[in-house]
Every structure is written in structure tokens, then in C-alpha cells.
Image (cartoon, rainbow, N blue to C red):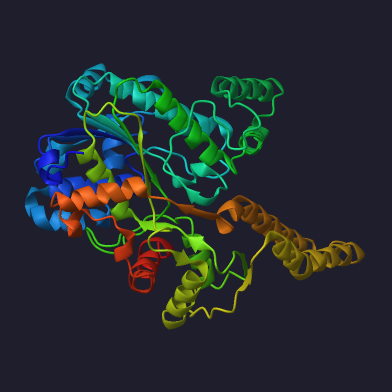
Amino acid sequence: MDLCSAVQFLENKTILVSGATGFLAKVFVEKVLRIQPNIKRLYLLMRAADVNSAHQRLHKEVLGKELFSVLRGILGSNIDSFFHEKVIPVPGDISCENLGIQDITLRAEIWKNTNIVINCAATTNFDERYDVAWAINTMGALNVLNFAKLCPAVKMLLHVSTAYVCGEGTGHIMEEPFCMGESLNGTYKLDIDGEKKLVDEKMKELLVEGRKEGIALAMKELGMKRAKFYGWPNTYVFTKAMGEMLIGHFKDNLPIVIIRPTMVTSTFNKPFPGWIEGFRTIDSVMASYGKGKLKCFLASPELVLDVIPADMVANAMIVSMVAHPCQSCDRIIYHIGSSLRNPLKFSSVRDFTIRYFTKNPWINKNGKLVKTSKVTVLSSMPNFLSYMRIRFLLPLKGLYWLDAIFCQYFKRVYMDLDRKVKVAMRLVELYKPYLLFKGIFDDKNSEKLRVAATEMGLNVDEFGFDPKCIDWEDYFINIHLPGLVRYVMKQ
């Protein structure tokens, strides 16, 4: 493992980044531009109809974000010319051959110049349509690999996956690659080509039947069914796991690094603490509590939540890039998380959230302070179902009969409550594998990388990704929750 200076390594490099408008990709791009202004070029692949649309998305959804304010302050009036020289928006689509890059000249330029390919593209909806998740998370990964193999100067492909490709694993979960066709339950061999045929046949069947309105629901149901058939809890992690398999199987001699982050949260340190975009996994729970909408929650108080700040993931990406260029070894897997070295209990997150919103109550759209109430925490699915039955389902049934007696006078109230109960039950079913997750992510490979980086003198303040340095109480109360309110809840 040869670790030169990360800043020196990035000098004069050209990097292709897919999924460039995503949360983690933006943190990575900002980091690279800030620490090494002599980067040669960043090609940012994004979905867009044409070059003009790509430029609009680049400035509105990436460079225009507050995340880049520190860089703007450093470069001042030179910022626009800097962005114009260094950052090239590329209209494309990873679900297509050649990444959907239609401009032949631009495509040839990217092939010729690219040194490193970073695949951050993904659809992260747990119950995404199977055809959509397949195209992006599975075939998209293969398309990025095939594109990278056509770049003569490429040193490596870094693929961002998720630690939760392990499914509902327990105990210590190791940093191990998947074998082609591996299933989690071991009952059936996973035939990836067969899954593709299944998706195509289902789409044809739905179109022949003229069920255009029901296609989305049918494909969502198919994805969840196939995932559970092979032992994965949802379509997202199932299709991400298949993407990893394809990369490993078809990589040839291309060096591959797979980063598997856990639940990614707001920035811890750089470029400034607390920047976040969109609701991450646990954020919707905290925001619902702050807005006074959370009445009950499924989770064991002793459950260890594995969260990791986005800038630490970006740091790990950069350090792994420096450590593994041009090494034609098998795939290197890095878990980037906290559950092993700095475990965080759900009970602590609950207490931090209560304390924060008690001291800083949410102000609703009417300008009134929201008073939060006690939340009932249920530690098992049977307890949750019993609570729902007593608290909501029995009253709902009574309201149904009352509505019938009074000639549908309560119909609107009944339908509204019925909808809310069904949404709550669906969300709990989707999140259950993570709310009751009992695994701990081993990070031996990541620890070796950290040790090597320290021994080689890399600046820990700038490139650190050791979760042991995080004081969770300070992070949640003074960084993450204020960031969640400012950048997500108030938007």
C-alpha cells in the first residue's frame, strides 16, 4: 500500500464521477476541488437532455449549494473561471451503454483523459420499481465498469455501495466480496441474467394487458418479492448486491475499490459542520418528532445505529484512491461506519433528539411553537402490531361502523385515518430490517487504511475517517440536528 500525499496524488488527475448530483458525490467533488485546485478535470455525469440542461443542473444542484461556500470564499472573483476550467457537466445515463453519452467527441475525450472513475450513482428507495433499480443499481454498475475499461489511462474504479448489502445479518459482518450468483439465504443460486429476463417479461405482460396505471406498483411488488426470495430485505440492497457481483465478475485486471458506507449523515468537520441534503435514513424520524408528528416508533433502545458523517466517507474515498491505483488485485472492500469502534445506541439518539427539540422547538407554518410529546418506543414487531391494533385499528373499525350508521357522515375522517395507518404500516415494514438490525460492521480493512495513512503522514484533520474521534452527544446536538433543521426541514 503506497500512500503518497493525497493532495499530490490528485494533482493533474482527471476523474469521472457518476451520480454527480447526489449528496455524497457533492461532498466528494467539493473536497477534491478545495484541497487540490490543480486537479486537471472533473467530468460530472448527470441525467440531462442535453449540454445546456446539464449545465443548468450543475450550477443549480451542485455548485450553487452552500456546501461550496468555503471554496467560493477561497477563490473569490476567480470562482466562475475556475469552475468553467475544472468542472465539465456530462449529460448521460448510467443505465445505457457508454453511459448514455451521445456526444461522440466528448465521449472520446473522457475515454482518453480519465485516470479514475467514481461510481456514486444509485437509486436508494427501498421499494423502488424493480426495472428502475435494476437499470441503475445493477446494470448501471456494469455499464460504468465497461466504460472505465475503455479508458487507457485509468488507474482504478471506485464503486460506492452500501454496507447493508449484507441484508439482515447478525454478529460481526466482514468486509468480504460477493461471489457471482451468491444468495443470502443459500436456498437458490441467483441467476442475474434470469432476473433481467424476468423484468423484461413482466414489463411486456403489463403492457399487453394495458395496465399502464398499475405498472409502477406491479414492478415495486416484483422487486420486493425477488429480493426476499433470495434473502435480501428490499429491492435497493438486492440490486446493489447484484451490481457488486457484476463488477467483481467482469473486472478483468482493472483495480476495484468498493466503499460500503453505513447510514451517511451530515458533515462532521469539512468544509464546515452540519451540511446535509435531503432526509437520510434516521433523519425522517427525528424530523417527525420535532414537528410533533411521531407518536410511536419501532426500535430496541439497545439497538446500535451505525451512522457515519458524509465528509468521513469522502475522506475514505480519497485515501483509498491514493492507496490502490494500478493494483490488479481482487476487489478491496471497505466498511465505512461506526458500530464497531464507536457504537451509538438508539436510546442515545432518542435522548439527543428530545433534548434538542425541547430547547429549540420547531415553529410550524402558522408561526406557533410545536410542543413535542412522549414517544412510545416498541422493541419488537409483535409489540408494535399490538400497539397499532389497540391504538389505531380498533378505533378505525369502530369509526367504520359509525360511518355506516350515519350514512357516511364520517367518511372523510375514516379515509384519512385509514390512509395514515396504512402508510405507517408500510414504512415500518420497509424500515424494519434496519430498525431491528443486530449486526456490527467489521472494519479491519478500513483500520489498516487508517493506520497506513497515519504512518505516511496524511493530515488527519483533513483526511480522517476514524469514528472514534466523534463525540456523539456533541455531534447530534450541536451539528447534525441544527444542520437537519437548517438545510432540510426549513426548505
**Which quadrant: the C terminus?**
bottom left
Looking at the picture, how far across and down is residue 292, in whole percent?
A: 55, 73
Looking at the picture, how far across and down is residue 301, in whole percent?
A: 56, 69
Q: How many marks?
A: 0
**Residue 27 can be seen in this image:** no
Viewer-proximal residue among 396 and 175: 175
Looking at the picture, how far across and down is residue 312, in whole percent?
A: 29, 54
Viewer-proximal residue among 151 and 399: 151
**Relative to 144, residue 467 above or below:** below
**Relative to 227, residue 96 above or below:** above
**Which quadrant: the N terminus?**
top left
Which residue is found at the position 58% from the left and 53% from the top?
Answer: 431
Report whether 342 appears left or right of 195. Answer: left
**Relative to 221, residue 144 above or below:** above
Viewer-proximal residue among 235 and 247: 247
Report whether 310 appears left or right of 390. Answer: left
Which residue is found at the position 39% from the left and 69% from the top?
Answer: 481
**Relative to 271, residue 348 above or below:** below
Which residue is found at the position 48% from the left and 55% from the top?
Answer: 281
Q: Quadrant of residue 17?
A: top left
Q: Quadrant of residue 421?
A: bottom right
Looking at the picture, how far across and down is residue 240, in whole percent?
A: 48, 36
**Residue 170 can be seen in this image:** yes
Which residue is found at the position 39% from the left and 58% from the top?
Answer: 338
